[in-house]
Image (tube, rainbow, N blue to C red):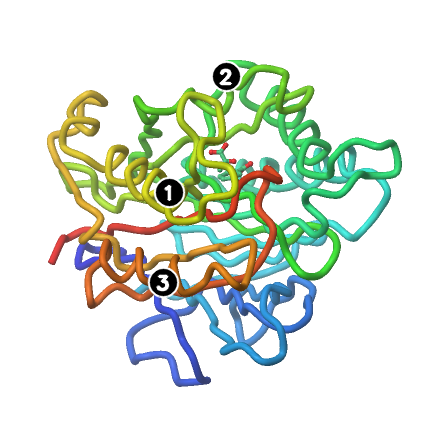
Amino acid sequence: MATYPHGLRCRLVRSPEATPSGRHVLGRVAFLGHHSAPAVRAGASEIGIHLVGAEVERVTEVWETDSPVVSGMYQDLAYAHDGEYLFCAGQVPEGGSYREPVRNAYRAAFDLIGKLDYPHVMRIWHFIGDINRANADGMEIYRDFCLGRAEAVDHHLGRAGDMPAATGIGALGGGISWYLLASRSGRVRNLENPLQVPAPSYPHLYGPRPPKFARATSFSPPGIDGAGDLFVAGTASILGHETVHAGDIAKQCDVTLGNMAMVMSRENLLAHGIDDGRTLKDLRFVKVYVRRAEDLPVVRAACAAAFSDTAEIVYFTVDICRSDLLVEIEGIAPYPRS
Ligand SMILES: O=C(O)c1cccc(O)c1
Ligand SMILES: CC(=O)C(=O)O
């Protein structure tokens, strides 16, 4: 993915293969037909997320570095780190309420980040079973999750503390599976999108505490100018804070892609003090989440037109954090651009 010293690299692997020589695996995220608990396997942190039916191609996202890795378990979190990068994965079991277990899981991760000294979190992913269903108290599970996360973030960063680009999406299995990437000395800058209200400022209409994430995160290792690796958060058909084009998959794709293009644009990077600019064609690793399987052909066509032929694009059929959203897309535009 990147050619700077201490390179962090992502690969999407469709069948088991050997790690290229000189590379070391920090984390493996296997998208499977079942969940598997975070564990250390062959020296790397590994988690299995139930995101595909038995009939669908399985894929593993592999995070590699070029320095040797130390791995271990910390309170149910499986982690690996190389002196510059930390990968950490966790799973909150299925239950009637997520507020407290999510708060505890986030606290464990903040503790680990502090203890190991990787203060710059650059990206987080969460896969939430029954995301649109009610918990035992009648609150939508996504809102319940957001509440626990917001409380942990308040505690560790303070109310104004900002969080990096994230994904919060459905899963086929229950509970919450999640993983993050952090760095020791790189520079993390969280970006907003002028077309969207920052998620942490969403009105109470969407739940008692807002989702704490940025629209994109620029990660620059020491010595690299510009945006470095640009992580674009899970993005959907939201303008301002409102869902637009409920029920219309083609229009939701257009708005989603427009939001992604805007957050990466030169205009937006300059507005955040970053002298750089990217387009949808710079995205190399794209995950596309589609609520209804019957919408896949329309979404595939929109993505094929928008993204580069050399982009790796993976499609999953899962629920999305608002019941009226039909599609959500995330991606990574790595440094250097090609
Ligand atoms: O709550 C989140 O972290 C989140 C982030 C991005 C998209 C999304 O649907 C949810
Ligand atoms: C996708 C989503 O949940 C958001 O942008 O708020």
Q: Earlier in the sequence, mark 2 or mark 1?
A: 2
In front: 303, or 171? 303
**Does residue 46 lie above or below 272 as drawn?**
below
Q: Which residue is mark 1?
A: 251
Q: Amino acid at mark 3?
A: Arg
Q: Position of residue 98 (x, y in %)?
A: 77, 38
Real-space Cα distance between discs 1 and 3?
14 Å
Q: Residues within 10 Å of mark 1 (few under 14, many from 20)?
A: some
Q: Residues within 10 Å of mark 3 (few under 14, many from 20)?
A: some
Q: Position of residue 152 (x, y in %)?
A: 65, 28
Q: Quadrant of residue 121?
A: top left
Residue 201, numbered label: 2
Task: Give SS at disc 2.
Answer: helix
Q: How many marks?
A: 3
Residue 37 appears left or right of 285: right
**Does residue 116 lie above or below 37 as drawn?**
above
Task: Tell me the quarter of the image containing the N terminus.
Answer: bottom left
Q: Residue at x 31, y 57 (%)?
A: 303
Q: Residues within 10 Å of mark 2 (few under 14, many from 20)?
A: few
Q: Residue at x 38, y 24 (%)?
A: 196
In front: 127, or 26? 127
Q: Position of residue 154 (x, y in %)?
A: 61, 20
Real-space Cα distance between discs 2 and 3?
32 Å
Q: Which residue is mark 3?
A: 300
Q: Are marks 2 and 3 in contact (CB under 8 Å)?
A: no
Q: Quadrant of residue 188?
A: top left
Number of the front mark, 2 or 3:
3
Q: Amino acid at mark 1?
A: Lys
Q: Answer yes or no: disc 3 within 8 Å of ligand 2.
A: no
Q: Earlier in the sequence, mark 2 or mark 3?
A: 2
